[in-house]
Image (cartoon, rainbow, N blue to C red):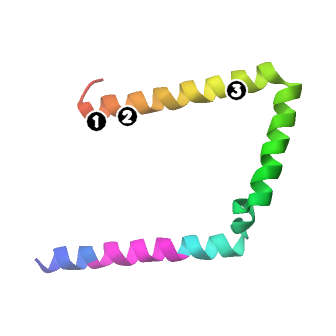
Amino acid sequence: MAQDKSKKIVRKVVIVGLIALGIIAFRYFDLGQYLTLEYIKASQEKFHTLYLSHRFLVIAAFAKAFENLMNSIGEKRNRLSGYN
C-alpha cells in the first residue's frame, strides 16, 4: 500500500517536472515567436510561393506524408485490437 502511494507521488512529481521543463524550454528558446499572427501569415505566404513554383513536388510530399500518417494510425489500431 505504501509503495502505491510513493509511486503515485513520484508519478505526479515527474509530470509536474516535465510541465515545468516544457515551460522553461518554451521561454528559453523563445518558441512564442512561432505562435504570432505575423509569423503564421509570413509562413503561409512562403508556402504559397513554394507551391506556385513546385506544385507537383508539394502535392507529392503532402500525399506521402498523409500516407505515412494513415499507415501509422492503422498499425497502432491493429496492435491495440490484437491483429498482427
Quarter of the image containing the N terminus? bottom left
Left or right: 67 in relation to 78: right
Q: What residue type is labelled 2?
A: Lys
Question: Which residue was labeled with disc 2?
Answer: 76
**Residue position marked by numbered label 1 in the rendering:** 80
> Which element is circle 1 on?
helix
Of tags 2 and 3, the one toward the viewer is: 3
- Given contact means CB atoms under 8 Å apart, are the residues at marks 2 and 1 in contact? yes
User: Going 19% across and 78% down the picture, which residue do you hit?
Assistant: 5
Q: Which of marks 2 and 3 is nearer the N terminus?
A: 3
Q: Is mark 2 on a helix, strand or loop?
A: helix
* 5 up-or-down from 49: above or below: below
Dot 2: within a 10 Å radius of its alpha carbon, few (fewer than 14), some, or many (20 or more) residues? few
Locate residue 16: give its quadrant: bottom left
Q: Residue 61 carries which label?
A: 3
Distance CA(mark 2)–CA(mark 3) = 23 Å
Tell me which segment is drawn in magenta: 9-20
Q: In this view, does 77 lie to the left or right of 61?
A: left
